[in-house]
Image (cartoon, rainbow, N blue to C red):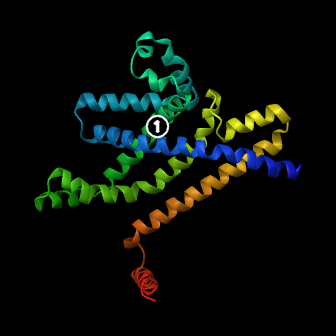
Amino acid sequence: MDFQFFGETILILSAGIPLTLTLASLSVFIGIFIAIGIASARLWGPVWMQKIARFYLFVFRGTPLLVQIFIIYYGLGQFEAIRDSAAWIVLREPFWCAVLALALNTGAYGSEIVRGGLLSVPQGQIEAARACGMSPRLGFMRIILPQAVRQALPAYGNELILLCKATSLASIITLMEITGLAAKLISETYRVIEVFAAAGLIYLAINFILTRIVSFTDYRLTAHLRPASEVLLEIDENLTGANP
């Protein structure tokens, strides 16, 4: 392996990191709302809404993400009604087609994680909230949601990592993120090993940072599960640092 070329390749591919992170961030932001909506429909929606939610899960969990990207980018433009609608402003751009496909896909998988987190809240606590006079909305925000987030965070962290890696598929619709730049560089140099090794190292670094963020967030949200002595020591260190 040519390590000089390897180092230069990392610098070249690093130019695609902002696009990769933008794709992942927007997809996660949209996908979490989709996940919450689908999970809520399955848990509390009427029968017709539950059937629609189940059909959505069946489609997006049962087909490859690559196929979904192709259908959204190449397929929807075949319909004249879509080309004449306001949606075409978004669907004609490969960037937004990739975001839409990634968001719909992660929303399907994330909805099951969210649903599991919501179901993990003991029914007794929900009934206690109602007995205290909390409205369903207030009980959801103060009792159900905080506990559901703590339960779902580790599994959703894995979904975030998978989504970050899945952004590499956006290169097939002309987006020059990390994998897109790698494919272009390979076509110019024919040096597959160095280029893909550099791309893999960049993805590894991104996902390492992401796992640390998820782990730290999970650590902060589960203070009640740690020994009391450890929590008190942490509080004492924070107070000492704030008052030198």
Instruction: Count numbered badges in the picture.
Output: 1
Q: Is residue 60 above or below residue 241?
A: above
Amino acid tagged 1:
Ala
Residue at image point 50% right, 53% down: 157
Residue positioned most to the right:
2
Whether residue 54 sits left or right of residue 142 in the image: it is right
| Residue 138 spot, x, y in % from top left | 19, 55
Q: Is residue 223 above or below residue 114?
A: below
Whether residue 79 sits left or right of residue 149 in the image: it is right
Residue positioned most to the bottom:
244
| Residue 36 spot, x, y in % from top left | 34, 43
Q: Is residue 95 above or below residue 201?
A: above
Residue picked out by circle 1: 103
Label 1 packing within 10 angstroms: few (<14), some (14-19), many (20+): many
Local SS, label 1: helix
Residue positioned most to the top:
80
Location of residue 88 (image quadrant): top left
| Residue 6 spot, x, y in % from top left | 82, 49
Residue at image point 50% right, 46% down: 25
Q: Is residue 237 above or below residue 3?
A: below
Whether residue 97 sits left or right of residue 131 in the image: it is right
Residue at image point 35% right, 46% down: 115
Residue at image point 24% right, 59% down: 142
Q: Nearer the viewer, residue 46 or 173?
A: 173
Location of residue 86 (image quadrant): top left
| Residue 64 spot, x, y in % from top left | 55, 30
